[in-house]
Every structure is written in C-alpha cells, then in structure tokens.
Image: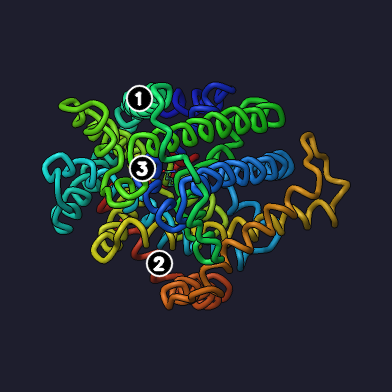
Amino acid sequence: MDNKEQKLSLKREVGLAGAVSLIGGTMIGSGIFMSPQTVLYTIGSPGASLVVWACCGLLVILASFCYAELGTVIKESGGEYIYILRTSGPVVAFLLIFSSVLFVRPAGVVGISLSFAQYVVAPFYPDCTPPVILVKCVAATAILTLATVNCLNVRFSMSVQVFFMVAKVFALVVIIIGGMVMLVRGHDENFEDSFANTNVGINSIGIAFYQGLWSYDGWNNLNYVTEELKRPEVNLPRAVVIAISLVTGLYLLVNVSYLTVMTPKELMSSNAVAVTWGNKVLGSWGWIMSVAAALSAFGSLNGTFFSGGRVCFVAAREGHMPDILSMAHVRRLTPSPALIFTTIISLVVLIPGDFQSIVNYFSFTAWFFYAITMCGLLYLKIKKPELPRPYKVPIILPILVLVAAVFLVLAPIIDNPQIEYLYVSLFIFSGILVYIPFIHYKLCPGLLTKLTLFLQLFLEVAPADKNL
Ligand code: ARG
C-alpha cells in the first residue's frame, strides 16, 4: 500500500521535462529504423520522402495542439476515448475502446516486436533476408519476456526505460553525425535531381504517410495522463511543441544521413536500414547499430506494455470494459489481467502479421479515430463556446487536421482498394454487435460476474483505485 501511495503522488508530479520525455520516449522506437525504406519505396524519390517525413511532423504538431485544447477543456485522463465519449457519445467511444483493445494496441506491440526481432537477427544474415519464422520466434520471445517483467514488477520496468532512452538517442545521434561527416566530404550525389520518379498517386502518398506516421505515433501520449500533469494548460502545449519538434528534427536528419550514405536502391532493398548504414560507415563496428536499434525497439515495447492499462481502466470505470481488465495484482500492483490479455492477442496477430501491413492497418484505424476526435473538438468549439478554455487553438487547425485525417483514411480505399481495409472497417463497426446486447441492454450480467470472480481468484487481482 505504501508503495502505491508513493507511486500515485509521484505520478501527479509530471512536470515539463517528464512530459517531454513521456512523448519523445514513446514516439522514438521502431519506426525510424524500419519505415524509411518503405516511405522511399512508395513515394519513389529521396526529395519527396524527406517532404513526407517533414509533413508527418507538421501534421502531428497541429493535431497535438488540438489535443492540448481538448486536454484542458476535458480534464480527465484517457485520451481520445474520453474526448469521444464526452462529445460523440458512448457508442462511438465503445467502438474506439473495442478496436483499441482488440486490435490497435496488440498491433502496436507486434509492429515494435517485429522491428526488434529484425534487428536482433540482421547481423547473422548479412547478405540475405532472414527466415520469417526465426524473426517471429524472436518477436514472440520479446513479447513474452516483457509481459512477464511487467506483470512481476512495476519499478523494474520503469527504471530500465532510461537505459533504453539513452540507447535510442545514441543510435540516432551516431547516424546523424556519420551522415553529416559524409555530406561535408561532398557525398551529395543521391540528392541530385532528388524529385525524379516521385509517385504522386493518392495511394502512394497515403501509404507513405501511414509508414511515416507510425514513427510519430505516441504524440498524443500525454493526453492519457492529463490528470497527473502539473499545470496542464501551460505544460501540455509546451511539452508537445518541444518534444515533437525535437523528434521531427531528429527524424529528418536521420533520413538525410541514410540517403547520403546509401543509394536509394540500397536503402530500399535493406531489411534493417540502420545495420546497412552501420556496415557502410562504421565498418567492422556496424553491428553496434543493430544492438542500438534493437534496444530502442525493446524500450518502446516495454513502454507500450507499461502504459497499457490506463485506457482500459478509464473505460472500465464507464462500464465499457469487463472490470477484470482494469484490476491490479493485490501485492505487486501491476495491471496483470490487461497485460495478459494484450499478450495473448498480440501473439495471435503476430502469426500472420508482417511489419508493413501491420503498420498500415494500425495507422488506418488510428487516424480514423483521430478524425472523430477532431470532429469532437469542432463540435465543442461551435456548440459550446462558453466552456472555460485555458488554452485555445484557432478553428482552422482542427479543420486542417480533420481534412488530412479524412484523406489518410480514404486514400488507400479509393485508389487501389485492398480487401484488407474493408475487413478492418468491418471489424471496427462489429463493435456495435457487442455494444447493443452487452452494454446497452446489459444482457447476461451474471456470466461476466462469475467469470470475473473466477479470474480474480486465479490471478490474485482486485480493483485498483487508479490503474498503473
Ligand atoms: N512511434 C513508435 C515507433 O516508431 C510506435 C508507437 C506505437 N504506438 C504506441 N502508442 N505505443 O516505434
């Protein structure tokens, strides 16, 4: 109990520095080591790929300004779930939590773990693609290890975060410095005629953004914990500007470095760009990049597990989630039911999933709900102008973000439609089939109570005051 109280009071103390690292730490992970080749491949030219990376940064900065207003008007923690609940109502909010618990979060876990696995095995297969089954087994091992660590001990998983943060920033800075040295020495031939062969198809632009935006995902992380932030009206907007501009700057420079060192062809055919980069620049020390990139992904995976229970907790408070998912272990205080649940689904998603498609479906679903959140902000601005707003954005911002989000969701559907996006959409809306009988009409309450009781005894968990 002691431990817990100390923890809660600690958590209410998130200041500016903590807030910046909370955002930056989630954003930097697997994407910048996995997506540059796909962005380049889909968009076709080095110049356009840098423009895509810059525009992704701009889009998430604008979106996070809008979230800052939402976070100061609707002060509860819970991110888009709570904003959608308060503006669009319980049905849409349920669809969000339904897709998030069953697909978006596990997909995030799988994407990051695949990146980790790719970098762990890359040094052993210098000249060929590693066997898929091996990559998946390594990914599964990482998921199971971190799930276990996070079920056993909160402290440990928190303290290792700093170590991983150092690893990722180190990797990015090494890549940037290496690239700059090469550029200064005059290796700029890959930037000649840098917009030649650009693909301007709607689908290419959409997919390139999906891949880029995956690397930026996590920009909204602070909105999940607004209740724990000191002076949110000041620190929320400040933290997002600092963190997102830093990350955007780093990502752009890293891409410039990749493009300086590798020809577009080499970049596109690489399975693990940072390793190819390392082999070319650091020679026999190239392996160090694979270690750093693997650690970066491992750290993000840990962070994703760690922050997972929160939204479930808020949703369970609203009766949208089985209570069991918001409970914590009686002694360890870890949200083990939610962790175990996410682990099981992640392992299922891992079996058929490959990094690129997982990232595309992830971004599709995420931006679908960001669009609805923007509609919520517009609704509040137009219909409830009287609400106190310590922080305000001009109405044009949510409109711009909404237009971009609608484009992102529709782009891969209208141009070159793939059946998978239909499945993902059907899945999102199938939440209604669960909502109507079980939440609206509250059918079979006894069934869930019995199951909850059984699982509570089995897992030794109890309702927590505040989820971890
Ligand atoms: N931006 C992260 C990366 O590049 C992925 C974040 C996944 N989303 C999340 N909420 N953890 O690895």
Callout 1: 10 Å neighbours few (<14), some, many (20+)? many
Q: Amino acid at mark 3?
A: Ser
Callout 3: 10 Å neighbours few (<14), some, many (20+)? many
Vertical position of residue 412 compared to residue 300: above or below: below
Q: Residue at x 53, y 59 (%)?
A: 205
Ligand 1 within 8 A of label 2's CB?
Answer: no
Of 149 and 354, the residue lying toward us: 354
Q: Give the residue number, with chain letter if any, for mark 3.
A: 30
Q: Earlier in the sequence, mark 3 or mark 1?
A: 3
Of 356 and 47, the residue lying toward us: 47
Q: Give the residue number, with chain letter if any, for mark 1.
A: 178
Q: Residue 66, percent across and down?
A: 70, 45
Q: Nearer the viewer, mark 2 or mark 3?
A: 3
Q: Amino acid at mark 2?
A: Leu
Q: Give the residue number, with chain letter if any, for mark 2.
A: 448
Answer whether labels 1 and 2 touch (C-beta < 8 Å): no
Quarter in which the C terminus is drawn: top left
The CA distance from mark 2 to mark 3 is: 37 Å
Q: Residue at x 79, y 34 (%)?
A: 390
Secondary structure beneath disc 3? loop
The CA distance from mark 3 to mark 1 is: 20 Å
